[in-house]
Image (cartoon, rainbow, N blue to C red):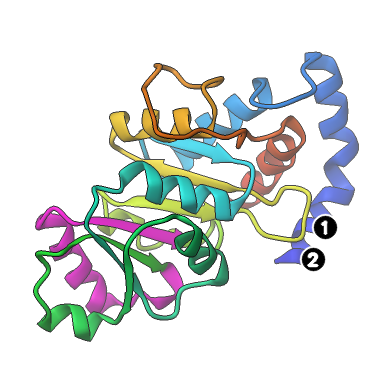
Amino acid sequence: MSNQYNRLLSKNCKKVLMQIYKNRYFTNHGPLTQQFEGELETFLNVSNAVTIMSNALAILIAISGSYSGKKVAVLSGCEKDVLDAVNISNVDFVNTTIDSLAIESLSSISMLVVSSNTLTKDNSVFLKGLEEKGITVIICYLSISDFHYHENFENAISVYSLGSGTLVQGGIITTNDDNLAEIFRNIRSSYGARQAIKVKATCNGRFSEIQAGIGLNILKKCI
């Protein structure tokens, strides 16, 4: 995946830079970022795509913005970015498995965080049942082309990685809940939010224009 990104970067970097110069917007959350978010919403068939400067920060914002105060269950086998975000999110969490969840009382759990690489057809049915019980499900995908389970989880919060160790490295939070999306945008930064919502903390997690320009070229390869 890293080699793919590097080839795309080498081929399209000049084109991206020329577009940024033409737009006369050189920093964060400009025309290219807004275009990228719009095209992501179409590609992933979701109401809201919120771009974040890093994948770990995107996961952290997704957890913090939807946390209801109960315990967070983290499914075994999650990627390092997921575990890092959970560890610094200041939430009460427990590492678990699908089998353990199936036999335990779910009354103390309000959220499940899972990596898409751990999902199978069988346990995706179980996770769908958790959604129906009102438990928030956050699915962390390894890339924007790895979304084959998305349609099974219409109400889930999804976080897509754009890779690590590359210039575009970032994350995308998607949700069909407009209110949650605004919370995520306000945590990311009040600039770029469509509606001001009071949140406990905020950060400068906005996507840069160079990230968005390269992301648009990567997205074209996925379509």
Asked if residue 202 can be seen in this view, the reply is yes
- Quarter of the image for residue 127 reads bottom left
- Asked which secondary structure carries label 2, the reply is helix
**Magenta-highlighted stretch: main secondary structure?**
helix
Please state if 66 lies on the left or on the right of 200 as rendered: left
Q: Amino acid at mark 2?
A: Asn
C-alpha span from label 2 to label 1:
5 Å
Q: Residue at x 58, y 25 (%)?
A: 34
Range drawn in magenta = 116-140
Q: Residue at x 62, y 53 (%)?
A: 162
As drawn, 209 above or below 61: above
Where is mark 1, residue-wise? 6
The image shows a total of numbered marks equal to 2
Indicate whether residue 130 is drawn in magenta.
yes
Q: Amino acid at mark 1?
A: Asn
Q: Which x, y percent locates residue 198?
A: 37, 23
Please state if 22 lies on the left or on the right of 32 as rendered: right
Q: Residue at x 9, y 64 (%)?
A: 107
As drawn, 68 above or below 216: below
Are circles 2 and 1 on residues that touch, CB within 8 Å? yes
Q: Which x, y percent locates residue 213?
A: 73, 35
Closer to us: 197 or 207? 197
